[in-house]
Image (spheres, rainbow, N blue to C red):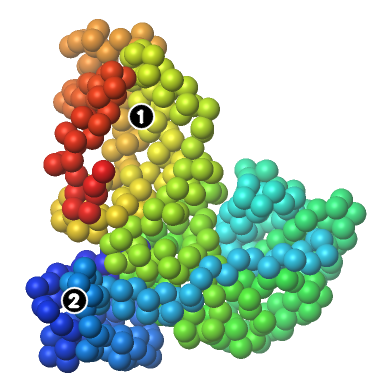
């Protein structure tokens, strides 16, 4: 998300380079561009006005430090105000209660509550070591209960069965008793989608909220609805004691208006972002890290955290030991590394978090596609074990068979093999102690902002 906003703000900063000082004159045009960028990102107008006023007040006349250009000084001001607008720091879930702690999920129809409930269960189990029970109180949507049961099985969470003939309050009460009996830590209550103008449905969720006394009442909303997401969250906040917001489908939102509007319009923090369809595609929302990503500075902290939690360390250490010993880097090793990258969200997610990527031309960024990585894995999977270990034996007839088996053209196989051969040479240099030389050789090929 934020691709368009990042590019516009990057242009503003470049235009200010070379100025000795930020003044009313040279910042006026810059702020006009920032205003247009925010409005195009579908940020709510009151939020845009407040943001621009605060930036102007701090930036005009500000002395530029010797080590900074005016562009960099403005970046600091804009970064700080973005953080303030989005909520200063990550608001973690407050689970400090007598177990089981209850999390109530609310939102519109189609916002992704059921999927997000399962993602949250997985996150609580993997990151906090909690024992989680999922229960569906959606007695209106066909197969909603079955969907949550399937997802609970996928993420390894406990599931409390219910049926459409029961009342939501009765279902939630029974699930809570079951969790107490089994000494579970958290109960996530998935509710039916509803509009804030539907009096009957809003009365129902208020009764549900009163019955289970949740420690967290989270509003789940589609980020792609832009500032409407913030307006809907505000309406629900008036009716329910919301403690936070989860933005779903953030990976499909190039604008980011919801993330920049929700906190200021509702006073409620964004606690998580849904960044994909897979059950692990949920990440805590850190305003400071998000501000850095918007301004093209990357998010190395989140990247390191993902590596720690998602990369198979044993597999990585085995590969490092193998290369150090001088043993060949094979296509099987290559496939394993691509699998590790896929766990971290693929190339697109990686580029989003690396510093300097925002300065790459859009034509280059558009070429980065996770489908290419999956195509490479398919090509490798179409090979025999012998071919994966001895790439030199892959000649004409073998290439045709591999291409047919993976649904690609022979030239695609040739291109992948060429890339792999180059990587093999790099690994060979590393095994001979040429890592520093290899890094220096790569230096000139790196995008702006990436340096060793």
Across and down, in percent, residue 89 comes to 51, 71
Mark 2 Cα-neighbour bin, 10 Å: few <14, some 14–19, many ≥20: many
**Residue 382 can be seen, yes or no:** no
Q: Between 263 and 160, which is closer to the camera in this rendering?
A: 263
- N-terminal of the two: label 1 or label 2? 2
**Residue 101 can be seen, yes or no:** yes
Mark 1, mark 2: which one is toward the viewer? Answer: 2
Query: Relative to 211, is 277 above or below?
Result: above
Extreme residue toward the left, this view: 18
Q: Residue at x 32, y 66 (%)?
A: 294
Occupied quadrant, residue 16: bottom left
Across and down, in percent, residue 403 comes to 25, 22
Residue wearing tag 2:
70
Tell whether 75 sits left or right of 264: left
Mark 1 Cα-neighbour bin, 10 Å: few <14, some 14–19, many ≥20: many
Residue wearing tag 1:
377
Q: Residue at x 33, y 44 (%)?
A: 347
Q: Residue at x 44, y 61 (%)?
A: 249
Q: Quadrant of the N terminus?
A: bottom left
Q: Residue at x 26, y 43 (%)?
A: 452
User: Marks 1 and 2: CB-CB under 8 Å?
Assistant: no
Q: Which element type, helix, strand or loop, lies under badge 1?
A: helix
Q: Which element type, helix, strand or loop, lies under badge 2?
A: helix
């Amino acid at each position: 998300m934020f691709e368009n906003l990042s590019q516009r703000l990057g242009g503003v900063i470049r235009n200010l380079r070379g100025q000795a000082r930020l003044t009313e004159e040279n910042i006026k045009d810059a702020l006009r561009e920032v205003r247009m960028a925010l409005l195009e990102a579908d940020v709510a107008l009151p939020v845009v006005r407040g943001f621009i006023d605060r930036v102007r007040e701090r930036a005009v006349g500000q002395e530029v430090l010797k080590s900074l250009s005016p562009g960099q000084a403005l970046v600091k001001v804009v970064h700080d105000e973005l953080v303030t607008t989005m909520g200063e720091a990550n608001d973690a879930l407050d689970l400090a209660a007598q177990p089981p702690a209850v999390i109530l999920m609310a939102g519109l129809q189609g916002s992704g509550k059921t999927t997000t409930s399962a993602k949250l269960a997985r996150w609580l189990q993997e990151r906090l070591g909690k024992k989680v029970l999922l229960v569906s109180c959606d007695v209106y949507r066909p197969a909603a209960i079955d969907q949550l049961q399937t997802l609970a099985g996928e993420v390894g969470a406990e599931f409390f069965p219910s049926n459409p003939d029961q009342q939501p309050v009765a279902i939630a009460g029974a699930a809570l008793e079951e969790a107490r009996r089994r000494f579970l830590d958290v109960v996530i209550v998935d509710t039916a989608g509803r509009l804030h103008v539907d009096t009957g449905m809003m009365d129902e969720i208020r009764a549900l909220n009163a019955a289970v006394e949740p420690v967290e009442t989270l509003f789940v909303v589609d980020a792609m609805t832009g500032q409407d997401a913030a307006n809907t969250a505000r309406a629900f906040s008036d009716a329910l004691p919301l403690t936070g917001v989860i933005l779903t489908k953030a990976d499909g939102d190039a604008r980011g208006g919801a993330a920049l509007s929700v906190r200021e319009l509702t006073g409620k923090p964004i606690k998580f972002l849904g960044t994909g369809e897979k059950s692990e595609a949920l990440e805590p929302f850190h305003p400071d890290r998000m501000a850095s990503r918007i301004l093209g500075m990357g998010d190395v902290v989140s990247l390191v955290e993902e590596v720690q939690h998602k990369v198979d360390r044993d597999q990585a250490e085995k590969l490092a030991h193998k290369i150090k010993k001088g043993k060949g880097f094979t296509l099987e090793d290559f496939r394993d590394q691509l699998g590790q990258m896929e766990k971290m969200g693929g190339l697109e997610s990686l580029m989003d978090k690396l510093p300097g990527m925002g300065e790459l031309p859009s034509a280059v960024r558009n070429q980065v596609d996770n489908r290419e990585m999956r195509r490479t894995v398919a090509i490798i999977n179409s090979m025999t074990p012998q071919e994966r270990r001895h790439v030199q034996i892959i000649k004409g007839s073998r290439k045709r068979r591999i291409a047919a088996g993976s649904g690609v053209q022979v030239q695609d196989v040739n291109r992948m093999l060429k890339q792999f051969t180059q990587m093999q040479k790099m690994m060979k240099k590393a095994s001979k102690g040429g890592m520093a030389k290899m890094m220096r050789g790569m230096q000139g090929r790196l995008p702006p902002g990436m340096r060793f």
